[in-house]
Amino acid sequence: MTHFFKKLRQRGVIKVAIAYLVISWLLMQLADVTFPRLQLPEWTVTLVLALLILGFPIAMVLAWAYEMTADGIRRDVADPADAQAPESPEVATAVNKKSIAVLPFANMSADSEQEHFCDGLTEELLYVLAGLPDLRVASRTSSFAFKNKNVDLTTVAEKLQVAHILEGSVRKSGTSIRITAQLIEVATDSHLWSETYDRQLDDIFAIQDDIARQIRDALKLKLAPDHSPYPTTSNSQAYEYFLRGRGFASSKGSKDQDLAIKLFQKAVALDPTFVRAWIKLAQSSANHSIYADGGKRGREIAADAADKAIELAPDFPESRMARGYALLAGKQYAAAEAEFFAAIEGDPKLSIAYHYLARSAYHQGQLEKALKYFNKSTDLNPEDYESPLLAVSIYEKFDDKENSLRIAKIGVDRVKRLLEDYPDHYRAYYLGIWGLTLLGEHELAKKWAERAYRLAPDDVATRYNLACFYSKNGDTDKALDFLESSITSRSWIENDPDLEPLHGHPRFQAVLDSLSS
């Protein structure tokens, strides 16, 4: 029954019911006063009452089937977010023998700039191996948590619940590259396969394919159909730019996003058919436009990149996501959501699509809808700490203490696990302070806020979240100091419950006035 009332509230049925009853009462008052003066028969007042009574269930059905949005009235179709989430990997117990973790390949080059290349190469191997049928591949976040850590492989395997580990190193000098790789069966501590590749950079694709083939043969896996018809590029220099761009984009810092955009642009300039580079360019440019200082130019880059991705790969779920990012940056919310839903139809486990559906709803002030999608993303991806922590303030606004505490604990637990392995992850720090505050860990929340600022004092997202933190803690001047040099999304700022204590302050209004609506 509680779930049913939540659905009524979520679809706006209760609001419509209240509005209908109020309007009906006013109409009855009007009829009672004016009909006799107009010398209408007495039964006409009864007729109005009967019509209003008959209209009530019709209004409720329409309210259930349709919703009011910033783009008008829309049909409320079946929402995949209402489907039950698959079992979370967090609760898995038995280790699948056909499972693997790809540890970050070590950078053996003299140039520290090649670190992003090594990270990108590792991600690409994860991407290729994920296409092998029946093979469970530990996620990027889980695997990268052990980067530069002196941890024995048994501990790694136990924590990631995998039976095999792929590790290696990369040494790059000019166009020459040496890649070593070894596949280890953890239970027996035996090497199932190892190889050293001394090649030119142009051979990077053949090396990746050979590593995947050797793993497939060693684990006796089936031949894989190409899980993406648009996997990569044949241009090695474009690929290097793409790998480095992915490394910068993963940090989500405003300056790193700017660097990632430039690298993705270089990649597509060398190979205009490089679909995945167009997709990443659309995502980074859209986010930079919405939340940083990308502005109109960022929106244009995102739109052009998305159009190119759709042109080259119209049925690729990530291409639809690219168009969704661009439309979201252009405030075309209904169209953006349609693209995210299309991506989900192509890949029902695409948790990032639900995360961006939530962001779209948030920008429109549809907080109940945002909650639904943040929760769905949280359920689908056990490493997503952002969605539960962004949901905390919404639950607080709705005075839902039970759920706010529940979602805060999920988010904080995930952040703490992440920080064990990434102690300088400033985004985790500044998002985690909301959950800590709600859970009563005020001193730790303050330490995390200070730590985030020391790590990234000029990052606009860091400054924005600190503005929210000090706003909720009653330090108005400090909150406004941070807000005035933070993100540039007026719709996000206007709808953020954490900034409500600042509403009405002249400096807060000045911030809004400086941003486009």
Image (spheres, rainbow, N blue to C red):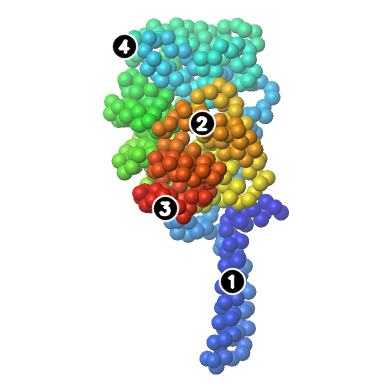
The answer to which image quadrant residue 413 occupies is top right
Evaluate whether residue 267 shows in this view. yes
Crowding at dot 2, Cα within 10 Å, few <14 / some 14-19 / many 20+, comes out as some
Disc 4/disc 3 C-alpha distance (Å)? 56 Å
Labels 4, 3: front one: 3
Is residue 310 depicted above or below 122 in this figure? below
Is residue 439 depicted above or below 367 in this figure? above
Mark toward the start of the polypeptide (3 vs 2)? 2
Q: Which residue is mark 3?
A: 506
Q: Which residue is mark 2?
A: 450
- State if disc 1 and disc 3 touch (CB < 8 Å): no
Give the x, y percent position of residue 57.
Answer: 62, 67
Evaluate whether residue 335 shows in this view. no
Disc 2/disc 4 C-alpha distance (Å)? 41 Å
Disc 2/disc 1 C-alpha distance (Å)? 50 Å
Q: Nearer the viewer, residue 121 or 106?
A: 106
Is residue 422 depicted above or below 427 in this figure? above
Disc 3/disc 1 C-alpha distance (Å)? 36 Å
Q: Which residue is mark 4?
A: 174
How many numbered tags mark residues here?
4
Mark toward the start of the polypeptide (1 vs 4)? 1
Q: Residue furthest right?
A: 1
Q: Nearer the viewer, residue 171 or 201?
A: 171
Labels 3, 1: front one: 3
The answer to which image quadrant residue 448 occupies is top right
Q: Which residue is mark 1?
A: 22
The three-letter amino acid code for the residue at tag 2 is Glu
38 vs 267, left or right, is: right
Crowding at dot 4, Cα within 10 Å, few <14 / some 14-19 / many 20+, comes out as few
